[in-house]
Image (cartoon, coloured by chain):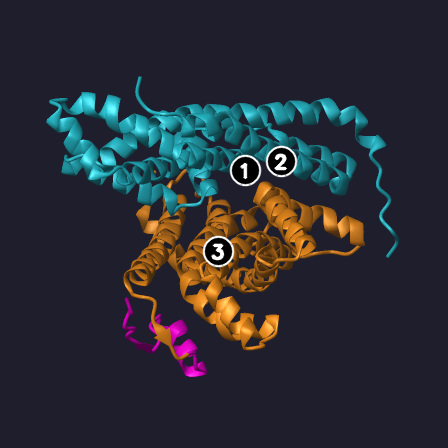
């Protein structure tokens, strides 16, 4: 049953599958974040129509099982458009749409965590909406948004395992292919190795998210110089240049 | 590239099959929830227990299950267990997989509920001379219950969404029927739109009903 001898031969293939899983999920997270910023900003805007459109989109996508979304892109859209969609673009498109709805909620709560006074101060300086957003709100909201974004990444990685059923060979797809090709159906070790692979990836990312969350919660709200360098450093190290704030009582 | 012509008439004979699929979806979701909510409470009690072994087991379970995709859990139940002589059909594997997954999340939800009870409540209960079981049953758990009720609604929704994955190991629920009818009629567009609408309506109804049902409980005063 457990034939660990086999495993060494397949380890490289499984590692490759894991790399493809990470890549597929990261690509979808990036594309989904772009959509998430748009829908999240719409959701927290004061225009009623924009708010309603964003709400309907977010609620609809979050109420559809990802399998249905994936099958829709892979089976239904090609029929409607009369063109072939290969597994990789189908998986990335479906995951991005899925991701964008969850990221929209992350962006919305990030934006709403910034006190009203910041908006008022910026507006009274005569800045237009998109500049307030770009220069004042988003840079601060970004800090709050990092831990939940990692959470969305972890759940995207888990959902991406479903890409294997439309024939895309990521970590789980690789495992299933190895089982089929090597007559290993009678052995448990490949699937257990796949489960372990997902566990290692998701567990370490979750721990990173938890660590960042604790640190964000611990620190006082800093007065930060949001230079390009500071944002770059934040993205790399998670720690912007901060000046201690004296809280005036 | 022509304009796709929607054809719903072809699907009329298949509507009963879709309907029974939807019933099966709700059935496996209800079974998984009925299994996972009590187990979630037990697991959460273990997570906050003084016993180090109980804590370690519960924590290990939660971390393991939450970091493995549901589909992998389903595959392991359905493909690996039979190798060890456990006879399991797809329906049982589907319900078990959903329950295993949901239990892990429920434990975390209920644990967060325990964490939000002020220490004063425990101290007050102890100073009244209640022993441990009385304290839990009459003081702590009722409050935890009220706190976690709204979040448990989200958990029900995510079980219903997850149940679609049971189609992959052959449970004949809505997603499975949708796909199998699609492969014989090629009306994938109409079929998946219908399925998506069903899930949207279903999930929104569950959220609404749960809010209505628990709104009262969440605000009712405690005690007799």
* Label 1 or label 2, whichever comes before in sequence order: 1
For residue B199, which numbered disc appears in the image? 2
Discs 1 and 2 share one subunit: yes
Q: Which chain is orange?
A: A
Closer to the camera in the image, B84 or A167: A167
Which portion, as a residue range, is magenta? Answer: A226-249
Quadrant where the C terminus of chain A sits is bottom left
Eyeballing the image, is A234 above or below A115?
below
- Binning the other alpha carbons within 10 Å of mark 3 as few (below 14), some (14 to 19) or many (20 upward) gives some
In this rendering, the label closer to the viewer, 3 or 2: 3
Residue B86 seen in the current view: no
Residue A117 seen in the current view: yes
Residues marked 1 and 2 touching at CB (< 8 Å):
yes
Residue B109's image quarter? top left
Membership of A239 in magenta stretch: yes
Residue under numbered circle 1: B161
Q: Which chain is cyan?
A: B
Circle 2 — which element?
helix
Residue under numbered circle 3: A109
The chain that hosts pointer 1 is B
The chain that hosts pointer 3 is A
The chain that hosts pointer 2 is B
């Amino acid at each position: 049953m457990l034939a660990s001898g086999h495993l060494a031969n397949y380890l490289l293939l499984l590692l490759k599958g894991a790399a493809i899983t990470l890549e597929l999920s990261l690509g979808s997270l990036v594309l989904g974040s772009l959509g998430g910023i748009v829908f999240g900003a719409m959701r927290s805007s004061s225009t009623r129509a924009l708010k309603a459109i964003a709400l309907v989109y977010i609620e609809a996508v979050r109420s559809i099982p990802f399998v249905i979304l994936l099958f829709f892109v892979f089976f239904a859209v090609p029929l409607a458009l009369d063109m072939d969609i290969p597994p990789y673009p189908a998986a990335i498109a479906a995951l991005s749409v899925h991701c964008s709805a969850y990221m929209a909620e992350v962006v919305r709560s990030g934006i709403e965590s910034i006190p009203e006074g910041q908006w008022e101060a910026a507006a009274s300086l005569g800045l237009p909406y998109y500049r307030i957003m770009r220069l004042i709100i988003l840079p601060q909201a970004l800090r709050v948004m990092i831990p939940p974004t990692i959470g969305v990444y972890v759940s995207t990685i888990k959902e991406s395992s479903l890409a294997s059923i439309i024939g895309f060979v990521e970590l789980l797809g690789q495992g299933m292919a190895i089982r089929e090709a090597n007559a290993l159906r009678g052995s448990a070790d490949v699937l257990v190795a796949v489960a372990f692979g997902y566990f290692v990836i998701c567990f370490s990312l979750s721990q990173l998210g938890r660590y960042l969350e604790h640190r964000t919660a611990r620190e006082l709200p800093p007065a930060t110089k949001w230079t390009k360098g500071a944002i770059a450093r934040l993205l790399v190290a998670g720690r912007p240049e901060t000046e201690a704030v004296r809280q005036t009582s | 590239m022509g304009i796709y012509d929607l054809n719903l008439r072809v699907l009329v004979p298949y509507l009963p099959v879709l309907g029974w699929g939807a019933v099966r979806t709700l059935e496996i979701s209800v079974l998984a929830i009925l299994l996972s909510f009590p187990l979630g409470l037990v697991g959460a009690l273990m997570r906050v227990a003084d016993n180090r072994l109980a804590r370690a087991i519960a924590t290990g379970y939660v971390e393991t299950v939450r970091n493995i995709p549901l589909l992998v859990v389903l595959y392991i139940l359905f493909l690996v267990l039979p190798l060890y002589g456990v006879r399991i059909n797809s329906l049982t594997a589907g319900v078990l997989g959903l329950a295993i997954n949901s239990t892990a999340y429920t434990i975390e939800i209920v644990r967060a509920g325990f964490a939000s009870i002020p220490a004063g409540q425990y101290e007050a209960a102890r100073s009244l001379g209640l022993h441990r079981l009385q304290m839990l049953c009459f003081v702590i758990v009722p409050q935890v219950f009220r706190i976690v009720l709204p979040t448990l609604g989200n958990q029900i929704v995510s079980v219903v969404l997850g149940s679609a994955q049971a189609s992959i190991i052959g449970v004949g629920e809505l997603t499975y029927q949708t796909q199998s009818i699609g492969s014989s009629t090629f009306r994938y567009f109409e079929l998946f739109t219908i399925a998506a609408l069903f899930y949207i309506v279903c999930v929104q109804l569950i959220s609404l009903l749960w809010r209505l049902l628990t709104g009262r409980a969440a605000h009712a005063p405690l005690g007799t």
